[in-house]
Image (cartoon, rainbow, N blue to C red):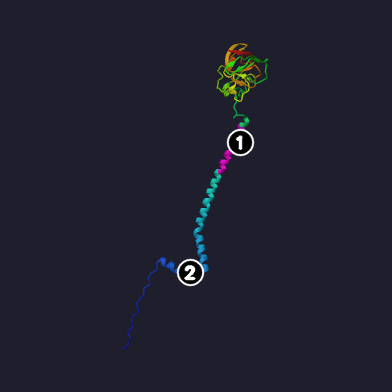
Amino acid sequence: MSAIVKPLPVIQDTPLTKTDQHLQGQHIYNSNISPSQYHELASEKDMSTSGPSTKSNVLSRFLAKSKYRLWIFIASIILVLLAIILGVLGGLGKLSPHSSSDLAVSGPSIGATKYPGTSNGTATPGHFDMYGSGDGTYYDPSVGITACGTSNLATDMVCALNYIDYGTYANPNDSPVCGACIEVTGPLGTVQVTIQDKCPGCGQGSLDLTPSAFNKIGDPTQGRIPVSWKPC
């Protein structure tokens, strides 16, 4: 009696998924390398995957620091320029207080004294009894603040008293001559004016008047005339 041979069952190959293929290939590959080689490859893989991110972080920090330093550099340049500008203005005297008679350098009040000048009397707070004579000139007080601290126009009836009779004070506003009324007489008449300024270029007894006041007592084409003055 012959043996009955049963046919073997047919085993169908199940297609491997991509994940199974990857794991299987990785297992076969890893089984063919030593542990030290495996760690080296793992380190290289980590470096390759983390490299771009690390470089990006370093670049970002560098750019942030560079931007910060750039703003510091720009601010430093601005401060240096401001210091230079302030130094130049200070050298030119633009930042120091001046009387308007100081600034009117182009007026007839600049020049040598032409007529003999004298002055007498005293001036104290609330009391003024000074009188004198000398040169009469004119200027525009609107170019600045007066030594008495007022703002006046060329049409105002005011004058600048010579620096000798005005006196020297830490604050020129404190001079007792400020606001005093004087009567000024020139070749063509008499006019009443108020002392509101100091004339640093005028000799003793001399006055620097506004054009409107000067025109009432002298010829403006002469520029410098003899005047006398006394309290109103």
**Residue at the disc numbered 1:** 84
Q: Residues within 10 Å of mark 1 (few under 14, many from 20)?
A: few
Inspect the image, locate mark 2, and give the three-letter code of the amino acid beneath it: Asn
Q: Is residue 76 above or below residue 186?
A: below
Residue nearer the viewer, 7 or 127: 127
Residue nearer the viewer, 124 or 74: 124
Side (left or right) of 68 relative to 91: left
Q: Secondary structure at mark 2?
A: helix
Between disc 2 and disc 1, the foreground one is 1
Mark number for residue 30? 2
Q: Residues within 10 Å of mark 2 (few under 14, many from 20)?
A: few
Q: Is residue 26 visible?
A: yes
Q: Main secondary structure of the magenta part?
A: helix
**Magenta span:** 72-89
Contact (CB < 8 A) between labels 2 and 1?
no
User: If the image is split into quadrants, where does the N terminus sit?
Assistant: bottom left
